[in-house]
Structures are given as structure tokens and as C-alpha cells.
Image (cartoon, helix red, strand yellow):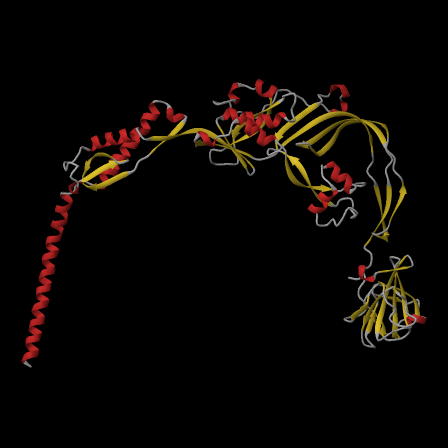
Amino acid sequence: MFRTSAKRSIEAQLVLASAAACLVWLLLMPNFRMESLRNQRLAVSLNNIDVGVLSSREEALSCLRAARRSFAAERIRDGSFDDALALSDAELTLTNAMARTDTAADLTDPEVVTEAMLSVLSGNVHATLGKHYTVKINEYSVNLADAEDVLALLDASLAVYDPEDRYRAELIQDPDREVNVLTAQVVRREEADAAPEELFPAGGTFRAQISVPGETVQDPESMDFSEFDLGLFDMDFNDKIEIVEAYLPDHELTDTDTAIAEVTKDRETPTIYEVKSGDTLSEIARDHGLTVDDLISMNGTLENANSTIRPEDEIIVTVPEPELAVRYETEEYLEESYESEPVIVPRDDWYTTKSVTVQEPSSGYRKVIARTTYVNTTEVARDIVKQEVTFEAVPKIIERGTKAPPTYIKPISGGRMTSGFGKRSRPTRGASTYHKGVDWATPVGTAVVASAPGVVTRAGWGSGYGYVIYIRHADGKETRYGHLSKILVKSGQSVSQGQKIALSGNTGVSTGPHIHFEILVGGSQVNPLKYVN
């Protein structure tokens, strides 16, 4: 009991002593920190050059900001800031001045430190970035020295298609961008030169469309051929051009001649060509500077040089094109033969697979003013502005069916194909070595259906076929179903596609229960698998 009370008394005294010690520490600590901060001295150096002693990091940063402002102000005063940006190192180092024997502990006037920092910045300019231009055309970009180089590049792209130098490029504010991005437009020189001065703000940027007051447009059909101003009619860039100011080192610039060569040189660009009537693979390849093997390698639908191509098929070809595409229109006087568009006469009682030419075409002859639109060297559109026909062309007249032809389905469900179409070993005595249809093994009594709608022309015994059914279809084809066990239709009966017409069997010359199926075109058997869906 005594020991327990004594122990509790001792513990209570220890707790009180600890609390008293904590209170003393809390009271004395703020005075100690304040005294420590009051006596702090920081030796300041910029780029390893001592510039003074200050009392805090914040004061050092304030001096550096002031030095930077003064550095920029000096460049503005001497005019160099308008054309370039200077880069100067600014590595600030702070150390405890009391721990260094080589640094005076006395504080330095912040203005003196700022001046010292300015001197260090001015003496450490290691790069100058000039104000230049970056030109972006699709995925291509190039850095040029000034606006004159940009215009020289754009004008060189136009000059390829403008030998008479009628057009030139102008820089304008991009109307589709909120930021300060320029783009280019093409103007006719004589119109731009005659425009009022207010259309050209500082820097020579053309910003308005030009119109001539009182100008009237004459109807081309009422004009004589000699009155047309033939040649280049209009020009514009066909690609999006973005031009931005950028501060860049000189070594990142491209000289004008190199930039022009890069932008105007041809590069191979995959393009879709639509097959026209009369085209052959060899002609298409030749016209695009390719070989037939090149076309085959680029087009998975072409198996070999004998692959069939049809009008309106699309074939991938490569066309040489420059980085910057130019769209332009020309007006030309031509005397030419011409063809009339074919006349298609629809026949609703014919299938789409049937067409008959009822009138052969013949060429006409005419004089025309043609306005042709090109993208680079590729013709993309052509309009006849005026024409005088010497003698009319005669159109080709074609009667063509409009009904979709019938489809063909497999005559049984399931089954295992045991013999395909074509040459084979004789399966049994009396059988042919050239199989004229397709066999599917199936149990006797399997339902046999009509492959397509038609009229039964024969239903009965057919020698080697055993029990057989012939059906004539509206598109002229015929189907045959052999080795049946039971016939469910009769000759002259109309049947629909999928209608049950018989049961499979093993009659006639047969090696086992199966269905023999044929399709005939023009009276000759063909491979049914090419027609069955």
C-alpha cells in the first residue's frame, strides 16, 4: 500500500516536471528563432560571381527580377528587341555568409546588388533569337528569315503554273484562327497594283477583295471567240497555309532557294484513279509513269496483268505532286471532236444483266472556249463556256434492264460435299469422268428445295440421273436436281425459291444417298458454287 502511494506520487512529480519543461521551451523558442533570423546573412552570387550580401531569399529574388527588367529595357532602348530576343544565363546561388571567411558579413544595399546582377546578365548573353517566320503546309514546315522570304517561297509555287507572272501571293490574317496566325491568298497583280492604298496596311498585307466600280459581266455566248482573254484565268492555293512569327536561332533557318526546292519538287503521292471505258491496266500504268507490276502491288484487288477492270472501278496510283498544291483555271480555244453522252433506255421487263445497243455512236465536231480547272497538273473539272458545233455527235442508245436477277440457294440444308464440278476419277461404272454439277451426301428422304423461282420443264426418270427435276428460271438459267427418291412437282408447274420439290435419294447411277445439283447457262453446265449464295 505504501509502495503504491509513493510510486503514484513520484509519477505525478515527473509529469509536472515534464510539463514545466515544455512550457519553458515554448516560451523561449520564438525569441530564439527571431534572433536567428535577425542575424542571418546570405552571400548572393549570380552565375558564380559574387554580387553582395542580403538578408533573405525573397530579397535576392526581388533584386534578380529588377535586374532582368533593366536588362530588357536596355535592349528596347537600343532597338535590338524589335528584331531579336537575347538569352542570358541566370543561375542564382545563396549561401550562409557567416560560414564563409571570404565574404564580408555586412549587408549590401539591394540597389547595388541589382546593378551587379545587371552587369552579370549583360556579360553572359550566349544566344540571340531573331524574329523569323515558320511556314506550315499540311505536315511540312520550314523556318524562313523574314516575310520577304515567305512571299518568295509562295510566289515560286505559283510561278510553276503562271509563266506570265500574272498572280502573286499576299499575307493576310487567318480569319479562322483567334490567335495571331497569318495565311496566304493569291491576287492578280494588275488588280492589286491598282488597289487604293488603304487596302494595304503597314507591312504590305493585302486584306480586301478588289472590285472595279461599274464593271459589267458580258454573256460568254454573245462574245466572239477572238474577244476572250485566253490563258490563266484564276489561281489559289489548294492547301491550308499557316504562317506564324517565331523567335529562332539562325542555325534553324532554311535559305530561300532550299525551301523553294523542297516545296516545289514533286513527291510520289498515292491517288485514286477511276477507270474509264476503254482503259487497260497497261495504259493506266503508262499514263502514271508506272509498270503493271507496280499497279498490282499497290492494289490487292488486282491478281495479275490479266485481271478484269470495269468502268468506275477505283485503282490506287501514285501521282507526283509538290508539297504545296496550287489550284488554277485556264480558258482555252479548242477545235475538237466530241462524243455525246450515251442515252440509256430502261426496260422494266429485263434483268439488269441484260443490255442491248440499239444505236451506235458517232463523233461530232465543234469549236469551244473551255474553262479547265487543275490542281497542279491534274485536270479536276472542265466547263464549256462557249461552243459552235460544226456537226452534231450521234449518241449511243442502250436499252438496259432494271429488274434485279434472281439469286440461287443451296437445294438442301446441311449435307457433305462429296464431288465438286469438273474433272474427276470415275466413282462407279457408268459415271462420267467430268462432273457437270456438285454432289452433297445426305440421307434418303432429305427435303430438296427449288434453288430459285421458275417453271418446272421436266419431272421424271432421267436415265443416269435417276429421278430428276429440271427448272427453267426467268434469267435464262436452268437448274437440275438428280438421284431423287420422290418427286413432289410436275412439269409446267411454277415454283418459288425455297419451295419443297422432292426428296433426296439414291436412284440412277449413284454410289450412295446424295443430291446431284447442276446450273446451266446458255445450255451448258457451269460451276454451281459460283452462283449459289
| Residue in the image at 40% along x and 26% along y | 82
Image coords of residue 66 (percent x, y) = 27, 33
Q: Position of residue 354 (x, y in %)?
A: 86, 51
Question: Where does residue 196 sit, x and y in percent of width and height?
Answer: 54, 19
| Quadrant location of the N terminus in the rendered image | bottom left
Q: Residue at x 22, y 34 (%)?
A: 50
* Foreground residue among 447 and 11: 11
Residue 461 can be seen in this image: no
* 165 versus 51 height, above or below: above
* Quadrant location, the C terminus: bottom right
In the rendering, at what x and y percent does residue 318 appear?
68, 40
**Left or right of residue 115: residue 484:** right
Based on the displayed image, in which of its 4 quarters is residue 329 positioned? top right
Number of numbered markers: 0
Q: Is 411 left or right of 70, judged from the image as shown?
A: right
* Residue 198 position (above or below residue 339): above
Give left or right: position of 440 versus 51. Answer: right
Using the image as rendered, state which of residue 331 and residue 313 is in the foreground.
313
- Asked which quadrant contains residue 93, the reply is top left
Q: Is residue 242 visible?
A: yes
